[in-house]
Image (tube, rainbow, N blue to C red):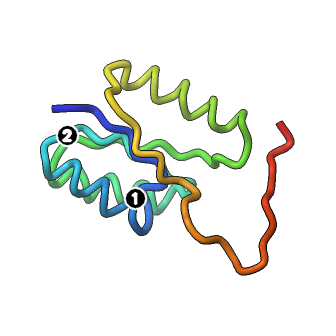
Amino acid sequence: MATILTTGASLGLGRCVAFELVRSGHVVPAHGRDGRRTERLVEELRTEGDAEGFVVGLASSAQVRELGARVAAARPDLDALVDNAGVGPGSGGAGRELSED
């Protein structure tokens, strides 16, 4: 089966997607920004299949590159990405924010 990185996997839709993928036999590198939540998720995923956690914020381009480098080093066989991190309606009236880099 495929190796599919899922970002924003520790909560909500990303969590559901990660479980569906691992239950379907895929290897799931799971990203989250909260270490404890991500660790707990990976423990649960591993009861059903192959998973690995990656904890890093994605608020800047540098952090995105860090995640990419870490995943590439650990899982050079990566097949696909479910880019779920930061997806949501945001808070009412919130403007768009850009990272410093």
Q: Of 88 and 54, which appears nearest the observer? A: 88
Q: Of 15 and 36, which appears nearest the observer? A: 15
Q: CA distance from mark 1 to mark 2?
A: 15 Å
Residue 81 left/right relative to 87: left
Residue neighbourhood size for the residue with mark 2, other residues' Cα within 10 Å, grouped as few (<14), some (14–19), many (≥20): some
Residue 10 picture location, percent across and down: 43, 60
The reply to whether the C-beta atoms of the residues labelled 1 and 2 are less than 8 Å apart is no
* SS at circle 1: helix
Residue 82 left/right relative to 22: right
Residue 26 tag number: 2
Above or below, comparing residue 27 to residue 30 in the picture: above
- The residue positioned 20% from the left and 40% from the top of the image is 26
Residue 38 picture location, percent across and down: 44, 56
- The residue positioned 72% from the left and 33% from the top of the image is 62
Above or below, comparing residue 89 to residue 74 in the picture: below
Above or below, comparing residue 71 to residue 40 in the picture: above
- Along the polypeptide, which appears first: circle 1 or circle 2? 1
Residue 14 tag number: 1
- The residue positioned 62% from the left and 31% from the top of the image is 66
Residue 73 picture location, percent across and down: 46, 20
Three-letter amino acid code of the residue under disc 2: His
* SS at circle 2: loop
Residue 95 picture location, percent across and down: 81, 66
